[in-house]
């Protein structure tokens, strides 16, 4: 079996992001700091997350901080995480929670292909797309 998991790299706010995403999706969080893992970083970065993971019934999202010894940090760009399915209530809930403190780039509305679709950049700079499948007649 092979599993594909998004892994987000942030800069000093991975723990906050992990808790935010738990508030959006629910699930269980595990996390290790650089200090706990014995990985040498600058003193002010020791409590940053070397690895954080949110596990739900239908996804795993990984998050870590990018310490200064890994070079310059760039806000994630050119990629979006996509949520889709038929459960309108759940997907609208995700949309509302991801939008808090974020920037809606495409409101959640009926798309030309018939589904309900929207795009939001959350407060951590992560691009999300939500597609609620049109109910079949």
Image (spheres, rainbow, N blue to C red):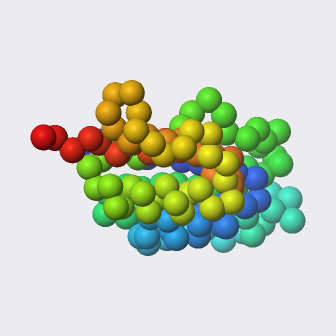
Image quadrant of residue 131?
top left
Residue 127, given in percent of the width and then of the height, sits at 59, 42
Find residue 122 and report its horizontal and vertical position in percent.
63, 52
Looking at the picture, does residue 9 appear above or below residue 18? above
Q: Is residue 72 left or right of residue 120?
A: right
- The answer, for residue 38, to whether it is visible in the render is no
Q: Residue at x 86, y 65 (%)?
A: 44
Q: Nearer the viewer, residue 106 or 80?
A: 106
Residue at 32% over, 55% down: 88
Q: Quadrant of the N terminus?
A: top left
Horizontally, residue 91 falls left or right of residue 126, namely left
Q: Is residue 134 left or right of residue 125?
A: left
Position of residue 94 measured from the top left corner of the image (x, y, whole percent) = 46, 59
The residue that appears at 26% across and 41% down in the rendered structure is: 134
Quadrant of the snapshot with the C terminus: top left
Front position in the image: 77 or 6: 77
Q: Quadrant of residue 136?
A: top left
Residue occupying the far right of the picture: 43
- Residue 119 vs residue 18, the one in the foreground: 119
Residue at point 76% right, 38% down?
A: 74
Q: Is residue 41 left or right of residue 135?
A: right
Q: Position of residue 98 (x, y in %)?
A: 56, 57
């Amino acid at each position: 079996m092979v599993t594909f998991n998004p892994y987000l790299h942030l800069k000093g706010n991975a723990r906050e992001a992990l808790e935010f995403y738990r508030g959006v999706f629910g699930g269980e969080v595990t996390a290790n700091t650089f200090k706990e893992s014995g990985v040498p970083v600058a003193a002010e970065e020791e409590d940053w997350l070397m690895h954080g993971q949110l596990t739900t019934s239908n996804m795993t999202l990984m998050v870590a901080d990018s310490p200064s010894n890994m070079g310059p940090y760039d806000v994630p760009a050119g990629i979006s995480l996509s949520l889709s399915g038929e459960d309108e209530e759940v997907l609208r809930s995700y949309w509302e929670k991801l939008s808090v403190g974020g920037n809606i780039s495409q409101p959640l509305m009926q798309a030309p292909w018939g589904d309900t679709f929207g795009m939001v950049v959350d407060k951590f700079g992560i691009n999300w797309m939500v597609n609620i499948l049109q109910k079949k007649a």
